Image: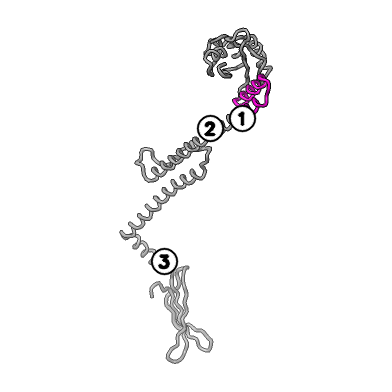
């Protein structure tokens, strides 16, 4: 019997157990002991005790496993499984990056480009690269659409504010009986709408219809800051083509100076720069042909 190290036969008579024969002895620590009851021809009862070593069975199982693993088919299968595991790990790794990118992407970070960490820059593009490129293009399209949407919102907001300004000016013109009150309301509304710190009304001189003189109508955000500018402006009269008001008087059209430091025709240039005024705008108020 393979792997059996100890075999013994016992006679069992009248509940007594006596050794009849034994063979071998137990040498290993890892064993299995089995006992079998036997009935002989004389209706007697005998007991067969067999002790089997597990080490031999372990060794045979290990040898058979090594033989199976050493076969060419199993080698190919194992290598294929390892390749699949590596490829699956790499794909899942990059897909996790894409999922994290899409999960954390919000409208405030649309300029952040998706870059797959671990991809060699000089390697040929694969499906993952094209997928990442598609995500980046979607991000750019979303950013462009959002910018267009913001510009449209700003355009509609400005239109709404302009319409509101025109309504307010129309109501003020209908309700006021004094032209100076209408002009003061107009200059105040325009300055508030555009966020301009200084607004002033020039009127035609009664002695010379080709000359503009300073009026008492002002809209000043900070009177203390622009006090000196106001004092100088009140002493200036503008003939045709002289200074910004005289230029508008001559052309009968609005005029804009983006940078007053580049315009030598701006008479209050020094004091304006001292008050940190950078630009100027003027428009005519025309009634009929006047």
Q: Is 142 on the left-hand or right-hand side of 130? A: right
Query: Which residue is denoted by mark 1 in the rendering?
Result: 167
**Residue 283 visible (yes or no):** no
Of residue 251 and residue 78, the one placed in the foreground of this image is 251
For the rendered model, the colour scheme is one colour
Q: Please say whether residue 179 is one of the residues in the magenta stretch.
A: yes
Whole-percent x, y for residue 85 in the image: 40, 53
CA separation in Å, label 2 and label 3: 84 Å
Q: Quadrant of the C terminus?
A: top right
Q: Earlier in the sequence, mark 1 or mark 3?
A: 3
Mark 2 in CB contact with mark 3 (< 8 angstroms): no
Q: Nearer the viewer, mark 1 or mark 3?
A: 1
Q: Please say whether residue 25 is one of the residues in the magenta stretch.
A: no
Q: Is residue 162 above or below residue 135?
A: above
Give the prevailing secondary structure in the magenta stretch: helix
The residue at 44%/82% (across/down) is 21
CA separation in Å, label 1 and label 3: 99 Å
Q: Nearer the viewer, mark 1 or mark 2?
A: 1
Q: Quadrant of the N terminus?
A: bottom left
Q: Residue furthest bottom?
A: 42
Q: Which residues are magenta?
A: 169-194
Query: Which residue is denoted by mark 3 in the rendering?
Result: 58
Decide: few, some or many residues near mark 2? Use Cα within 10 Å; few <14, some 14-19, many ≥20: few
Mark 1 in CB contact with mark 3 (< 8 angstroms): no
Q: Earlier in the sequence, mark 2 or mark 3?
A: 3
Decide: few, some or many residues near mark 1? Use Cα within 10 Å; few <14, some 14-19, many ≥20: few
Residue 272 position by quadrant = top right
Total label count?
3
CA separation in Å, label 1 and label 2: 18 Å
Mark 2, secondary structure of its residue: helix
The numbered mark at residue 155 is 2
Decide: few, some or many residues near mark 3? Use Cα within 10 Å; few <14, some 14-19, many ≥20: few
């Amino acid at each position: 019997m393979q792997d059996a190290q100890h075999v013994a036969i016992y006679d069992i008579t009248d509940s007594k157990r006596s050794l009849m024969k034994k063979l071998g002895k137990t040498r290993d620590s890892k064993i299995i002991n089995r006992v079998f009851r036997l009935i002989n021809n004389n209706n007697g009862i005998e007991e067969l005790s067999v002790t089997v070593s597990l080490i031999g069975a372990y060794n045979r199982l290990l040898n058979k496993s090594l033989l199976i693993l050493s076969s060419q088919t199993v080698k190919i299968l194992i290598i294929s499984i390892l390749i699949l595991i590596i490829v699956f790990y790499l794909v899942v790794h990059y897909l996790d990056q894409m999922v994290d990118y899409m999960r954390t992407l919000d409208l405030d970070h649309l300029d952040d480009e998706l870059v797959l960490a671990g991809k060699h820059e000089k390697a040929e593009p694969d499906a993952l690269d094209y997928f990442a490129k598609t995500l980046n293009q979607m991000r750019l399209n979303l950013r462009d659409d959002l910018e267009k949407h913001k510009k449209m919102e700003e355009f509609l907001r400005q239109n709404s504010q302009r319409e509101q300004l025109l309504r307010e000016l129309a109501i003020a013109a209908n309700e006021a009986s004094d032209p100076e009150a209408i002009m003061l309301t107009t200059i105040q509304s325009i300055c508030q709408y555009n966020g301009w710190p200084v607004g002033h009304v020039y009127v035609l001189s009664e002695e010379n219809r080709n000359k503009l003189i300073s009026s008492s109508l002002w809209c000043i955000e900070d009177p203390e800051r622009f006090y000196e500018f106001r004092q100088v402006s009140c002493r200036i009269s503008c003939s045709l083509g002289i200074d910004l008001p005289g230029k508008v008087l001559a052309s009968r059209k609005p005029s804009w100076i983006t940078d007053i430091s580049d315009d030598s025709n701006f008479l209050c240039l020094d004091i304006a720069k001292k008050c940190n005024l950078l630009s100027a705008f003027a428009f005519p108020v025309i009634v009929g042909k006047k």
